[in-house]
Image: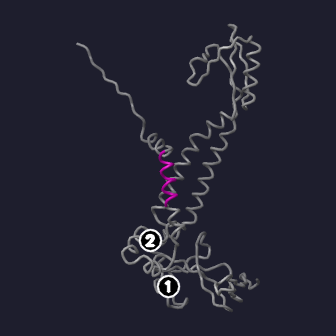
């Protein structure tokens, strides 16, 4: 009676599967395409405008559709941030996996030859038959390689034959590293611009937009005020001629948040120049900025 033993080959772990998925070219290309489409929408459609303007422009049906998709503030929607976040993970995974190997390849010395090397076994090869002597043929091949940017090295195999190895583009991998690093920097800037701390504060309820646009600033709820040190915001403000303000308003949905500014802005004069046809030519604002000490 014999015992039967079964053995199974362990497949890749879940961690390696996740890493391979994040570092795949298909995922990166798909995320870049989605990011490009979202950026086009955010460029064509004016962002963070009052909801009344969108309702008049698109009508009730499409207004609701675009609002539910978050197209009125594309760059701060959750799905846009998810795309950017996954792109950062994907690009970082590629960079972490490939950079050490590329650095080693750039730093390694010129290729060496072993006696077991068989040039006929290479996938990419070209075979040329010539009646020239060995020295002349070797000189011709090395001259051609140098003319095309290679650094040829001669290796005598000891059997009367000569192997020529050429190498170029050693430092071209720097472009790969810099390109991926630039993508990470740009995506990090997009995440920074999304003002994630404010979104989290609104999620927990500590910050709530004000919906009444007709009340004075002193009546706005404290929950609608953002801190002075808010790292990123995009605010708008209307300043009458001869007056000043020290706050900006960030539109959020059908409401707004008040952003205190670290300076005071005063509009001294507003001037409009016209063409001879009566069409506006230039809109000129003469403004003055004052610091906390009241100095411009």
What span is in magenta?
26-37
Tell me the residue at 62%/50% (across/down): 181
Q: Position of residue 59 (x, y in %)?
A: 40, 78
- The quadrant in which the N terminus is found is top left
Tell me the residue at 50%/67% (across/down): 76
Q: Residue furthest left?
A: 1
Q: Main secondary structure of the magenta part?
A: helix
Q: How is the image coloured?
A: one colour
Q: How many marks?
A: 2
Q: Is residue 61 above or below residue 31?
A: below
* Front-lying residue, 16 or 81: 81
* Front-lying residue, 215 or 66: 66
Say few, some or many: other residues with alpha carbon within 10 Å of mark 1 (under 14 / 14 to 19 / 20 or more). Answer: some
Q: From the viewer's perspective, is 214 left or right of 99?
A: left
- Quadrant housing residue 169: top right
Task: Say if the magenta span includes residue 161.
Answer: no
Tell me the residue at 50%/91% (across/down): 215
- Quadrant housing residue 285: bottom right
Q: Position of residue 159 (x, y in %)?
A: 68, 7
The answer for how far apart the CA atoms under marks 1 and 2 are is 17 Å
Location of mark 2 (residue): 204
Q: Residue furthest front?
A: 277
- The quadrant in which the C terminus is found is bottom right
């Amino acid at each position: 009676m014999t015992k039967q033993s079964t053995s199974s080959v362990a497949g890749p772990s879940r961690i390696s599967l996740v890493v391979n998925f994040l570092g795949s070219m298909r995922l990166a290309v798909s995320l870049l395409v989605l990011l490009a489409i979202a950026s086009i929408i955010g460029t064509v459609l004016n962002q963070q405008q009052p909801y009344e303007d969108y309702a008049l422009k698109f009508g009730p049906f499409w207004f609701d559709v675009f609002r539910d998709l978050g197209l009125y503030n594309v760059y701060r929607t959750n799905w846009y941030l998810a795309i950017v976040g996954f792109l950062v993970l994907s690009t970082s995974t590629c960079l972490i996996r490939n950079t050490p190997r590329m650095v080693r390849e750039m730093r390694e010395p010129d290729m060496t030859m072993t006696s077991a090397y068989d040039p006929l076994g290479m996938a990419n090869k070209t075979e040329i038959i010539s009646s020239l002597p060995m020295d002349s043929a070797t000189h011709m091949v090395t001259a051609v390689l140098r003319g095309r940017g290679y650094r040829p090295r001669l290796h005598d195999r000891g059997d009367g034959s000569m192997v020529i190895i050429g190498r170029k583009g050693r430092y071209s991998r720097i472009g790969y590293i810099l390109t991926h690093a630039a993508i990470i920097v740009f995506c990090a800037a997009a995440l920074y611009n999304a003002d994630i701390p404010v979104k989290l504060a609104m999620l927990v309820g500590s910050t709530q937009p004000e919906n009444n646009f007709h009340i004075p600033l002193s009546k706005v709820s404290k929950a609608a005020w953002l801190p002075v040190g808010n790292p990123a915001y995009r605010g708008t403000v209307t300043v009458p001629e001869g007056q000043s303000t020290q706050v900006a308003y960030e539109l959020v949905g059908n409401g707004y948040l008040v952003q205190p500014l670290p300076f005071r802005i005063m509009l001294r004069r507003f001037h409009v120049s016209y063409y001879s046809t009566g069409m506006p030519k230039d809109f000129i604002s003469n403004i003055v900025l004052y610091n906390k000490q009241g100095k411009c």
